[in-house]
Amino acid sequence: MVDKDIYKTLSTHATYRVDSSHPLPDARSALGRFLKKIGDIFNRAPAVDSKLSGRISELEINADTILQELIAFKKKSEKELDPRLFSALGSLIDPIIKEIARLQVSVKRKDGATQQVKIFSRYTVLIDKARFWIQQGKDRAGKKKIQDAVILHIVQDFHERVERDIQLINDYLTHAIDGIDAAIEVKNELRAQLMPMLSPSLLRLYQLRESNEEPSLESLVLWRSKADNSRENLFSSSLHTIDTFFKDFLPTPSKEKESEYMLALLMQLVNLEEKIMGVSDLVNYDVLDNTQRGVTSDMLEKLEQEAHELNRNLRLSDEHGDRVQQSLHIITSLRKKIC
């Protein structure tokens, strides 16, 4: 969940605006929607609609058709668009294809209520994104219209990454506070003292969503590179602020090493998931010969060993342990497909 103090920090500064010439909505309405989403996440109960399983099954059936149409649009675009525009388009379409394929594997596991809600929510978002691009093909959108859409969606993708960074900072802060052996009153006091130090980095991170000018296709790569560099620096600065604060208030020799270890563990899990999704893309959408099947099988064996090694780590939280188990399920499914 998003920390209440982080939510208040962003709410207090809800008056920032983007440049009106940008194709995105103005920042007041965009920020309002973002803050509402944070509030919805914070207050949402893990209840499951009795018809949820049926809805997921319906989405799963639609997903097969959607994937075929999206891949067809991508192949058609490769022939009609110049390489630079097609490359930018592929950077948006390929992740949609990969994640829908991952969800198709996940939904077969029949996980608990909370996981089903997440799957349904993510499925809905991805299918909406896929349908947008499919419709561009059906409308025979010209190069200019597709180019404008690509620029808009790459900017929006960056905004989503900023939101994920804020969420991870919140998770890291929660982990740091939960690790303190102290009464709840002490923890609340420490949190209150920390937030004024953390707020500047959080606000600057969120303000990266603002744009003084609309990037062109030519400047898009440079813009994204600079924006991602700033985002990564602010993200690291926020984590450093949390580490330094708790080291000052509760100095222990192993505190810094423990924080570094937990962050490394999180990054190791994310890296594992990304590698598995890369192999999944090969297996699901490429025709493999015998040699390629052998190489893929070796890759899956190494990834399985890495997942088992992670799973044996006693510091892994229940949530992250579930993600490792999901990775193992995907590896098993991929093995069956290449047999």
Image (tube, grey):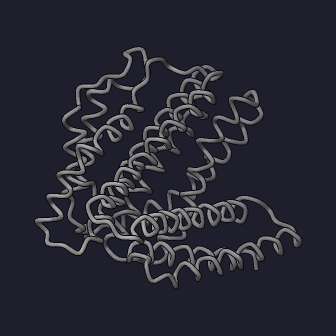
Is 34 on the left or on the right of 256, as rendered?
left
User: In percent of the image, x 18 and y 73: which residue is there?
Assistant: 182
Q: x, y percentage for residue 307?
A: 59, 77
User: In percent of the image, x 54 and y 36: which residue is there?
Assistant: 135
Q: Is residue 255 above or below residue 232?
A: below
Q: x, y percentage for residue 214?
A: 50, 19
Is 69 on the left or on the right of 236, as rendered?
right
Is 224 on the left or on the right of 206, as rendered?
right
User: In percent of the image, x 68 and y 29: which residue is there?
Assistant: 85
User: In percent of the image, x 42 and y 42: which residue is there?
Assistant: 162
Q: Is residue 89 above or below residue 63?
A: above
Q: Is residue 147 above or below residue 172?
A: above
Q: Quadrant of residue 35?
A: top left
Residue at the farthest left position: 185
Quadrant where the C terminus is found in the figure: bottom right
Q: x, y percentage for residue 181?
A: 23, 75
Between 257 and 122, the residue placed more toward the observer is 257
Residue at the farthest top position: 21
Q: x, y percentage for residue 256?
A: 43, 64
Quadrant where the N terminus is found in the figure: bottom left
Between 11 and 28, the residue placed more toward the observer is 11
